[in-house]
């Protein structure tokens, strides 16, 4: 392990009456340290705790200041290797890597419309012109798990934020009417059969924990959250579009185009929007999957680590996901096309959209939409998604209220309410 930090310990100084104790020599400093780390305040005859950092070589240093510890970790990094892997500073090297794509998994489609370029500058001189005479709607969802030993309840809701650059006479009614919550749902995740209705369960509303794949029961609740979000977000988009009919020109949606959990609902939404002729752009704020690196046969680097080397305001090539593995066979027009984009605020996102929308609008137009959306938010993450997120977020008062309702319903049913420790601990979160 060399000099690597391997543990942090609390050393107890009990011999306060010992004149040689280091505690006597730095009494005021110990008090400050204890206030900082939540230790025991110094009182007569009371034990006092001091944070210590223990190195592998046995040396001990004061851990009340974390900066030296961070600097030590930083000094152990191999920056020459990181620089050598900076593919976007060597476009030839990037070309070599991407030409190893397994096209049965992922196809690079940028070259169909432009010369062989791998880095695209999306910075706009006049971003305000991109959405001229358009109505945009951003959608996001929020969820809250209400844990219990016998069954947990997952509450989820979805809302939209509207933005218009159409004629002012139509803009006000559209923006004020479309800024709203559209759908919510509560799913039961039961610990054993019989607690949830089998009839309802067949329609994938209430679930048995064994229906979900997860290491622990709470992992399964996490999966149920994704299911609930897929349901309400798809329902919200369809409800909004049906309400405003032909008024919506473009939809922004938080999260991937679709995933294994809630796949049927997401695909139904995609097919519905295609029939309406409304394009949708999905913003993945925290990309985890690595479809490009996996298709290149690279296992020691993630897509995020690779494409994080993009300069601000630039994007990667467009890609088309050819194989979704666990998902049913899709028509090519329903498959996801995607690219990575680095905002001017240095946030890396993955942008996903159905392939039919790329063919209809073109990569240049979609790229300018992403850049303009970010510019509306000062170069940060998506303006449309950020506004929808602020609108749908479940605040602390609502969280406390729903937990109180859950407890009250248990008591009215004559069932003992068992609240997990972490829920009690983070009740205000």
Image (cartoon, grey):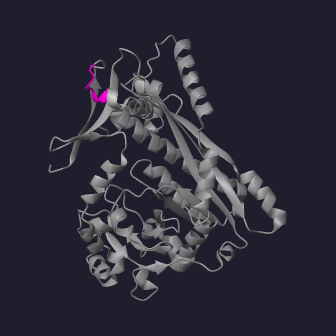
Question: Looking at the magenta stretch, what is its main secondary structure?
Answer: loop
290, above or below 414, in the image = below
**Is residue 19 a member of the stretch shown in magenta?**
yes
Q: In this view, does 89 lie to the left or right of 245?
A: left
Q: Magenta span covers which residues?
A: 18-23
Give whichever of 294, 207 is nearer the camera: 294
Residue at left 32%, top 50%?
68
The single residue placed furthest to the right in the displayed view is: 169
Q: In this view, does 241 lie to the left or right of 206?
A: right
Q: Can residue 369 be seen in this view?
A: yes
Q: Is residue 262 left or right of residue 290?
A: right
Question: Where residue 416 sits: x, y (%)?
Answer: 46, 13
Residue at left 34%, top 64%?
305
Give whichever of 291, 360 is nearer the camera: 291
Give whichever of 162, 286 is nearer the camera: 286
Give whichever of 101, 262 is nearer the camera: 101
Question: Where residue 214 sits: x, y (%)?
Answer: 32, 39
């Amino acid at each position: 392990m060399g000099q690597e930090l391997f543990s942090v310990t609390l050393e107890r100084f009990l011999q306060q009456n010992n004149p040689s104790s280091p505690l006597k020599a730095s009494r005021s400093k110990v008090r400050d340290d204890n206030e900082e780390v939540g230790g025991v305040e110094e009182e007569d005859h009371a034990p006092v705790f001091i944070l210590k950092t223990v190195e592998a070589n046995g040396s001990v240093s004061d851990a009340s200041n974390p900066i030296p510890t961070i600097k030590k970790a930083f000094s152990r990094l191999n920056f020459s290797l990181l620089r050598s892997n900076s593919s976007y500073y060597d476009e030839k090297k990037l070309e070599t890597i991407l030409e190893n794509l397994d096209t049965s998994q992922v196809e690079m489609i940028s070259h169909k419309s432009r010369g062989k370029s791998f880095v695209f500058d999306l910075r706009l001189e006049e971003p305000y012109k991109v959405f001229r005479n358009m109505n945009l709607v951003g959608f996001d969802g929020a969820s809250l798990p209400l844990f219990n030993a016998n069954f947990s309840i997952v509450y989820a809701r979805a809302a939209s934020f509207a933005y218009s650059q159409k004629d002012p006479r139509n803009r006000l009614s559209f923006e004020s009417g479309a800024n709203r919550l559209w759908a919510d749902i509560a799913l039961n995740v039961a610990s054993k059969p019989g607690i949830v209705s089998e009839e309802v369960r067949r329609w994938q509303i209430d679930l048995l924990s064994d229906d979900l794949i997860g290491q622990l029961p709470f992992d399964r609740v996490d999966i149920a959250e994704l299911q609930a979000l897929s349901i309400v977000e798809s329902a919200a988009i369809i409800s909004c579009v049906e309400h405003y009919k032909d008024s919506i020109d473009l939809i922004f949606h938080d999260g991937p185009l679709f995933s294994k959990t809630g796949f049927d609902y997401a695909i139904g939404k995609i097919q519905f929007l295609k029939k309406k002729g409304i394009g949708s752009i999905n913003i993945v704020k925290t990309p985890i999957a690595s479809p490009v690196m996996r298709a290149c046969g690279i296992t020691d680097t993630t897509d995020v680590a690779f494409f994080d080397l993009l300069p601000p305001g630039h994007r990667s090539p467009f890609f088309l996901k050819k194989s979704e593995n666990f998902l049913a066979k899709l028509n090519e027009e329903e498959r996801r096309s995607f690219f990575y984009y680095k905002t001017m605020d240095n946030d890396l996102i993955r942008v996903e959209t159905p392939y039919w929308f790329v063919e209809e609008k073109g990569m240049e137009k979609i790229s300018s939409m992403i850049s303009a959306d970010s510019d509306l938010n000062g170069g940060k993450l998506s303006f449309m998604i950020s506004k929808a997120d602020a609108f749908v977020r479940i605040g602390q008062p609502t969280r406390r209220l729903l937990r109180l309702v859950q407890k009250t319903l248990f008591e009215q049913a004559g069932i003992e309410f068992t609240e997990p420790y972490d829920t009690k601990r983070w009740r205000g979160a």
